[in-house]
Amino acid sequence: MAEVFRHEEEILEVRADWLDRLKRAAAESPLHRARLCLHLSTDDTVQEMLIAICRNLLFQPHRHLRKTESFHIIEGDLYVLIFDDRGEVIRAIHMGPPGSGRVFCYRLNASRYHAILPRSPFVVFHETTAGPFRTNEAQFAPWAPADEDALRDFLEGKLTAELRKTGL
């Protein structure tokens, strides 16, 4: 099954059936994610996607030197961890859909290291970032482990410490 869905339509309408399709594709994907590109080309200056991820998906903390990004949660919940250059958490943003009582939309306007930590079986969100899309543009944090098990322990430990520090 495809992990990236594209279209060539001048006017694109997305209905709820896409959420199930993306979650199904993410569950079947070895990458544990799937996306519907709302933009037409990787060269577009605005890249918009609906993305479904599974709970076990991890991204190594990274930053974008010349890009911003925003997330709008549609379904599920996750933490976005924002780090300083030494690897200390400066913000842990608990996100969920509108009505959940959690932050449902965030935008990162600075070149900060960040990572996401899904908390529900699936998370579906709308992401917007600057284009064009180029692979290997992200700068990975030198202080974060690359090994998946070590990375999970690292992120969980950082989140737990931040929640204790902030009293949540």
Image (tube, rainbow, N blue to C red):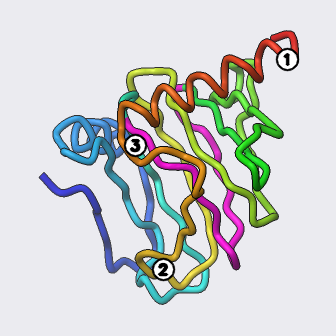
Is tag 2's residue or tag 3's residue first in the polypeptide sequence?
3
Q: Disc 2 marks which amino acid?
A: Phe
Q: Disc 1 marks which amino acid?
A: Lys
Please tell me whether mark 1 sits on a helix, a strand or a loop.
Answer: helix
For the point 43% across and 54% down, the residue is 14
The residue tagged 2 is 133
The residue tagged 3 is 52
Alpha-carbon span between mark 3 and mark 1: 31 Å
Alpha-carbon span between mark 1 and mark 2: 37 Å
To which quarter of the image does residue 21 belong? top left
Which quadrant would the C terminus be assigned to in this image? top right
For the point 71% across and 67% down, the residue is 68
In percent of width and height, residue 158 lies at 66, 28
Tell me where the magenta segment starts and ends, as one range: 57-76
The residue tagged 1 is 165
Q: Is residue 160 left or right of residue 34?
A: right
Question: Is residue 61 on the magenta stretch?
Answer: yes
134 vs 46, nearest the viewer: 134
In percent of width and height, residue 108 lies at 76, 57
Is tag 1's residue or tag 2's residue first in the polypeptide sequence?
2
Q: Which label lies toward us, 2 or 3?
A: 2
Dot 2: few (<14), some (14–19), or many (≥20) neighbours within 10 Å? some
Dot 1: few (<14), some (14–19), or many (≥20) neighbours within 10 Å? few
